[in-house]
């Protein structure tokens, strides 16, 4: 009797192959998000690819970003983000489509809606528009101008998996301050 073959886990390399095929077949961002969403979830739910360094956080910014993949033209960026307890990031957009899944721990996503018309430089008025606690395997998706903030309210480091149409440091990305209505360009430091 033949022994059963081991089933290969879905890994980052498999995901990249699937991701490239999706964007080659489809230009509509919402269609891409619908097709990428279950793949990001699948990768997050079986994180055999996760390494200890993916849990590393920069104490100065309260989180750490590890790039897993990026195309030479800066498209199709896949990364992990680890958050220190009590830390997060201010309201921001991504400037590209995004699909994010929890891997370890839970992160609170607060969703915001912009209410000004965007015509004043450095100004962005936003209002809270909901929230979701995202744990392992939970997925949130964003269009380029969708705004959210994140906070790790737990007492442990959390990890999430992020997939973007473009590396966010190469997009028209903004961070917002709801108290002052200030809007600034945003670039993130990567490990």
Image (cartoon, rainbow, N blue to C red):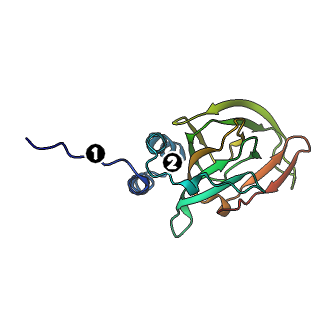
- Of residues 145 and 120, the one drawn nearer to the viewer in this rendering: 145
Mark yes or no: residue 91 visible.
Answer: yes
Quadrant of the snapshot with the C terminus: bottom right
Q: Position of residue 35 (x, y in %)?
A: 44, 43
Q: Residue at x 49, y 43 (%)?
A: 44
Q: Which residue is mark 1?
A: 7
Q: Secondary structure at mark 2?
A: loop
Task: Classify mark 1: residues with Cα within 10 Å, few (<14), some (14-19) or many (20+).
Answer: few
Whole-percent x and y of residue 115? 81, 38
Classify residue 97 as left or right of residue 25. Answer: right
Name the mark nearer the viewer: 1 or 2: 1
Task: Categorize mark 2 by other alpha carbons within 10 Å: few (<14), some (14-19), many (20+).
Answer: few
Q: Which residue is mark 2?
A: 28
For the view shown, which residue lies furthest in the left direction? 1
Q: Nearer the viewer, residue 28 or 85?
A: 85
Rounded to the nearest angstrom, the CA distance separating label 1 from label 2 is: 33 Å
Residue 165 is tagged as: none
Quarter containing the N terminus: top left
Q: Residue at x 78, y 57 (%)?
A: 60
């Amino acid at each position: 009797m033949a022994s059963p073959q081991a089933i290969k886990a879905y890994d980052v390399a498999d995901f990249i192959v699937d991701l490239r095929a999706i964007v080659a077949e489809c230009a509509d961002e919402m269609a891409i998000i619908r097709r990428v969403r279950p793949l990001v979830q699948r990768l997050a739910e079986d994180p055999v690819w996760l390494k200890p360094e993916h849990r590393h956080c920069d104490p100065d910014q309260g989180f750490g970003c590890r790039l897993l993949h990026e195309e030479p033209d800066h498209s199709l960026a896949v990364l992990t983000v680890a958050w220190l307890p009590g830390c997060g990031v201010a309201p921001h957009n991504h400037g590209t489509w995004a699909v994010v899944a929890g891997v370890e721990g839970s992160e609170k996503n607060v969703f915001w809606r912009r209410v000004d018309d965007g015509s004043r430089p450095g100004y962005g008025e936003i209002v809270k528009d909901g929230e979701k606690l995202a744990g392992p395997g939970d997925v949130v998706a964003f269009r380029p101008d969708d705004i959210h903030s994140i906070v790790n309210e737990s007492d442990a480091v959390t990890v999430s998996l992020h997939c973007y149409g473009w590396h966010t440091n190469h997009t028209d990305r903004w961070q917002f301050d709801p108290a002052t209505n200030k809007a600034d360009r945003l670039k993130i430091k990567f490990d």
